[in-house]
């Protein structure tokens, strides 16, 4: 069993910060469970373009409001607490928070925590070498 708090992650290497967002990586590939879980804060008034070409991501909004635009269809959707979006087609998208947004993100395959968005907003596929089960 793994039990972890956000306080344990804050200001460690699992707490990744950028100009537009902050991502606390709670569960990572090294745990060997097939997904990763992050708490992400998106800052009000920013615009972030993402494209997870190598991952499927589900995002559940717990606080704040804004919009997400699907760059493939041009559709824009409202984001508010209780909203979930699933990037099931590796959808290129832009998130525009009107207020600070807090969300829980789940990635499959799991991220290692070492990924960095490239110029297209893509995380490379980084594989964690896990020890063989005993």
Image (tube, rainbow, N blue to C red):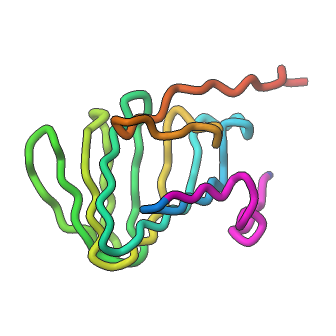
Q: How many marks?
A: 0
Q: Is residue 14 left or right of residue 49?
A: right
Where 105 falls versus 130 (above or below)? Answer: below
Residue name at image x 38 percent, y 67 percent: 61
Q: Is residue 115 left or right of residue 7?
A: left
Q: Is residue 10 magenta?
A: yes
Q: Is residue 76 magenta?
A: no
Give residue 79's quadrant in the image: bottom left
**Can you give x and y, in whole percent of width and height, for residue 34 in the image?**
60, 34
**Can you give x and y, in whole percent of width and height, for residue 23 in the image?**
55, 58
For the C terminus, the quadrant is: top right
Residue span colored magenta: 2-18
**Can you give x and y, in whole percent of width and height, for residue 36 in the image?**
58, 45
Residue name at image x 37 percent, y 40 percent: 121
Residue name at image x 74 percent, y 72 percent: 7
Q: Residue furthest right?
A: 134
Residue name at image x 51 percent, y 57 percent: 18
Pick the residue in front: 124 or 110: 124
Give residue 4's quadrant in the image: bottom right
Give residue 65's quadrant in the image: bottom left
């Amino acid at each position: 069993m793994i039990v972890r708090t956000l306080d344990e992650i804050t200001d460690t290497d699992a707490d990744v910060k950028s100009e537009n967002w902050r991502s606390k990586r709670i569960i990572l590939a090294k745990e060997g469970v097939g997904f990763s879980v992050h708490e992400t804060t998106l800052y009000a008034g920013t615009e972030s373009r993402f494209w997870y070409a190598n991952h499927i991501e589900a995002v559940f909004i717990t606080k704040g409001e804004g919009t997400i635009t699907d760059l493939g269809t041009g559709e824009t959707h409202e984001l508010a607490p209780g909203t979930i979006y699933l990037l099931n087609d590796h959808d290129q998208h832009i998130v525009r928070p009107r207020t600070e947004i807090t969300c829980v993100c789940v990635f499959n395959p799991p991220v290692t925590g070492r990924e960095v968005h490239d110029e297209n907003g893509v995380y490379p596929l980084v594989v964690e070498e896990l020890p063989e089960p005993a």
